[in-house]
Amino acid sequence: MDCDKAIDRVYLYLDGEVVVWRRWTIRRHLHRCPQCAQGFAFEVELRQVVSAKCRDEAPAELRQRIEKHLGSSAE
């Protein structure tokens, strides 16, 4: 796997949306490529910060409007 492919697939990897053998090839590339590994580490840390700091809940009215819209679009 080259750097371009690894970068394209790193978000899918982080989201757990790649099959086992693809995860293995991405991990292998990250172990062999310090530049991609550094970028990957940054993305992991960024996700952790966003997850820890962005805990606000949407107002109940907004959630209801979204649920209503999603329910009507499914029909």
Image (cartoon, rainbow, N blue to C red):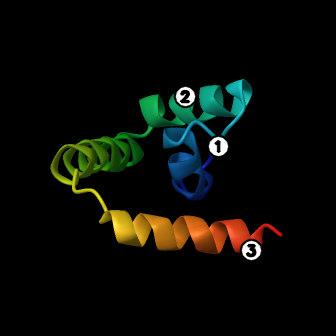
Mark 2: few, some, or many residues within 10 Å (few <14, many ≥20)? few
Task: Indicate the position of residue 42 as horizontal and vertical percent values.
Answer: 27, 48
Residue at 37%, 70% (x, y): give it.
Answer: 61
Amino acid type at circle 3 is Ser
Q: Mark 1 vs mark 2: which is more N-terminal?
A: 1
29 vs 66: above or below: above
Q: Which mark is on residue 1?
A: 1
- Between label 3 and label 2, give the one nearer the viewer: 3
What secondary structure is marked by label 2?
A: helix
* Cα distance between the residues tagged 3 and 1: 40 Å
Q: Quadrant of the N terminus?
A: top right
Q: Mark 3 vs mark 1: which is more N-terminal?
A: 1
What secondary structure is marked by label 1?
A: loop
What secondary structure is marked by label 3?
A: helix
Residue closest to the eye, 67 or 8 = 67
* Cα distance between the residues tagged 1 and 2: 9 Å
Residue at 52%, 30% (x, y): give it.
Answer: 27
Task: Indicate the position of residue 28 as horizontal and vertical percent values.
Answer: 55, 28
Residue closest to the eye, 73 or 7 = 73
Residue matched to label 3:
73
Amino acid type at circle 2 is Arg
Task: Indicate the position of residue 50 as horizontal and vertical percent values.
Answer: 24, 52
Q: Are marks 3 and 2 in contact (CB under 8 Å)?
A: no
